[in-house]
Image: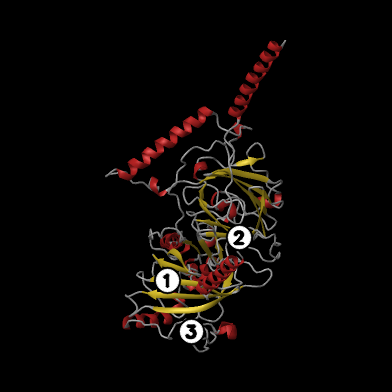
């Protein structure tokens, strides 16, 4: 009898031990301990880039349906493509007689260091597509880029004019300038973004938003902590300026826009970033973009003196006027 | 036993008195501090006065556009230059006069260019300091200009920029910021006072009391000036309950001026 119990207990112990081991293996990673600032806030400081999702489209191609993530095989293919591109960039940079073309050389741009697993930057609705525009929004004019015989600077986007890319456009991944430096002080979070030198001061003291008549391109941000997640709510936007697209492109949003951003540090070098777009005058329902931003060795922001050196604006406009003069003579 | 204890207590008291006497008298009380005891400059600050018109003493005078009437005039003001005069070399003094004459064409502020250092400090706009446990950032309302003061191992400027390369250090209660890598395109004010790309600026920020800072900047530029010189002024904490850094993206306000002649007729 005693012998039987001993066997039973031993067996149970073996089973329990194996089960625990299996469970431990099923967990994705060791729990991450969020560092804190000396005044007790979760510490998100550092310079973070959205580079890794450069090759991820804003909207999911319709044929992919509800497929949120790439397969392991597809991911391996992307990794190989990134490695090939890195090799190609190196060749371009060092070759004595490298072919020049109209595109900037590889080292001008920023590249993904590892592929982004998701198939679109839009993560909600589940089909990865932006919701339908309201009838009112369909009439909104999107400023066109260069090359359309501009009558004035107002034909160009706010980005080309070096005014701003808006909140979304300042963090969505593009060919370069994807850095966001987070700096925190007691009661504040500051987001410094390289392109068009944005500085978003986010008070954490639960003060109310600025009055409804104080409106701006970057809006009025208020932050708070939900656990270790920084939640930033932004309102008071100007009407009809930037859109929720790359570099602030896309249908210009309205004065009813409310953005809710969530920054969650999931490991020392990764923040999961999410933004909920709620603009009932422009979109028929709220939607979300989300992607990881990462801290990379040696990556830093530089001064982006955009307007100060905007010769392209002079050249585009004077070129258009010269073309008109030449056409008159014919 | 009792005697020994008395001697011990007396010794402790004497030691405390001695240590108290050794503490620097200038350590400010009642100012905000970080958890490590460093002064905490986090807040919204702004200069008063009219140094943004002219950092030297100046009388009230006409503005450039009569249509603005008295709202466009330049108010009188006391200068912020120690000793009153900027020690220009003769050819630089002549250039300053030319700058002033052509101000509407040449002043970077008119064009909404970044203000540089130290001009951003005393423009008629507030600026927000956010101080972390290490680095300190300044976001200026004007033109959304900003800079980060590196408080770690000093870094050399990678390239010349409008806002320069800032390395900070603590000298007791004073934040000392060494600014290099300025591109020399910035002016000091609306009166054409200027610098070159060889300029080196040392700023000092110190609390006078909880709501006032004393700001100083020493300017060294031996291509323009005969000797280093200094400006000093107080900075005031914005105390309105709802004071905050607003947005002044001024490019839009300068486009007609800059590109208007290229508009399709």
- Residue beneath label 3, please? B79
**Which chain is home to disc 3?**
B
How far apart are the alpha carbons under marks 2 and 3? 35 Å
- Residue beneath label 2, please? A186
Does residue A133 appear left or right of residue B38 in this picture?
A: right
How far apart are the alpha carbons under marks 1 and 2? 26 Å
In the picture, the disc for residue B202 is 1
Q: Earlier in the sequence, mark 3 or mark 1?
A: 3
Q: Position of residue A210 (x, y in %)?
A: 68, 64
Q: Residue furthest left?
A: A96
Q: How is the image coloured?
A: secondary structure
Badge 1 local density, few (<14 within 10 Å), some, or many (20+)?
many
Q: Of discs 3 and 1, which sits in the foreground?
A: 1
Question: From the image, which quarter does the C terminus of chain A lie in?
Answer: bottom left
Q: Are marks 3 and 1 on the same chain?
A: yes
How far apart are the alpha carbons under marks 3 and 1? 19 Å
For the residue pair A47 and A13, the one nearer the viewer reads as: A13
For the residue pair B86 and A254, the one nearer the viewer reads as: B86
Question: From the image, which quarter does the N terminus of chain A lie in?
Answer: top right
Q: How many marks?
A: 3
Q: Position of residue A120 (x, y in %)?
A: 58, 39
């Amino acid at each position: 009898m005693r012998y039987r119990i001993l066997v039973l207990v031993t067996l149970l112990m073996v089973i329990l031990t194996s089960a625990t081991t299996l469970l431990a293996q099923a967990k994705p990673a060791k729990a991450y301990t969020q560092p804190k600032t000396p005044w007790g806030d979760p510490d998100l400081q550092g310079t973070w880039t959205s580079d890794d999702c450069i090759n991820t489209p804003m909207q999911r191609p319709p044929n992919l349906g509800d497929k949120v993530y790439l397969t392991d095989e597809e991911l391996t293919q992307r990794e190989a493509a990134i490695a090939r591109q890195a090799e190609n960039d190196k060749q371009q940079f060092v070759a004595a007689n490298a072919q020049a073309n109209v595109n900037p050389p590889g080292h001008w741009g920023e590249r993904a260091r590892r592929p982004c697993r998701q198939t679109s930057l839009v993560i909600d609705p589940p089909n990865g597509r932006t919701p339908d525009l309201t009838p009112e929004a369909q009439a909104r004019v999107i400023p066109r880029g260069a090359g359309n015989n501009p009558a004035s600077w107002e034909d160009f986007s706010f980005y080309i004019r070096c005014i701003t890319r808006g909140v979304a456009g300042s963090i969505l991944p593009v060919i370069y300038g994807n850095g966001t430096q987070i700096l925190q002080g007691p009661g504040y979070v500051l987001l410094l973004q390289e392109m068009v030198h944005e500085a978003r001061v986010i008070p954490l003291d639960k003060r109310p938003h600025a009055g409804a008549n104080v409106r701006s391109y970057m809006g009025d941000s208020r932050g708070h902590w939900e656990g270790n997640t920084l939640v930033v709510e932004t309102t008071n936007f100007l009407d009809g300026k930037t859109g929720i697209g790359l570099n602030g492109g896309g249908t210009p949003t309205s004065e009813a826009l409310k953005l809710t951003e969530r920054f969650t540090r999931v490991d020392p070098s990764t923040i999961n970033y999410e933004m909920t777009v709620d603009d009932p005058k422009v979109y028929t329902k709220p939607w979300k973009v989300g992607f990881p931003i990462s801290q990379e060795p040696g990556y830093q922001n530089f001064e982006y003196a955009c307007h100060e050196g905007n010769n392209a604006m002079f050249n585009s406009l004077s070129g258009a006027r010269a073309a008109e003069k030449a056409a008159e003579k014919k | 036993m009792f005697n020994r204890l008395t001697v011990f207590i007396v010794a402790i008291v004497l030691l405390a008195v001695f240590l108290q006497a050794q503490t620097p008298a200038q350590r400010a009380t009642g100012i905000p501090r970080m958890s490590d005891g460093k002064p905490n400059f986090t807040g919204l600050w702004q200069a008063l006065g009219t140094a943004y018109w002219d950092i030297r003493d100046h009388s009230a005078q006409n503005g450039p556009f009569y249509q603005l009437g008295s709202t466009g005039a330049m108010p009188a003001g006391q200068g912020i230059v120690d000793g009153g005069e900027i020690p220009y070399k003769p050819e630089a003094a002549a250039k300053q006069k030319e700058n002033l004459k052509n101000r509407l064409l040449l002043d970077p502020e008119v064009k909404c260019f970044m203000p540089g250092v130290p001009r951003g400090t005393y423009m008629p706009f507030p600026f927000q300091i956010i101080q972390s446990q290490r680095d300190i950032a300044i976001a200026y309302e004007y033109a959304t200009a900003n800079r980060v003061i590196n408080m770690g191992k000093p870094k050399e400027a990678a390239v010349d920029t409008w806002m320069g390369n800032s390395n900070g250090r603590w000298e007791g209660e004073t934040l000392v910021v060494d600014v290099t890598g300025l591109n020399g395109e910035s002016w000091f004010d609306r009166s054409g006072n200027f610098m070159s790309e060889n300029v080196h600026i040392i700023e000092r920020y110190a609390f006078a009391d909880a709501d006032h800072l004393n700001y100083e900047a020493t300017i060294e530029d031996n291509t323009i000036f005969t000797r280093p010189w200094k400006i000093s002024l107080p900075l005031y904490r914005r105390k309105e309950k709802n004071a905050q850094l607003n947005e002044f993206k001024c490019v839009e306000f300068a486009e007609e001026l800059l590109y208007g002649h290229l508009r399709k007729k």
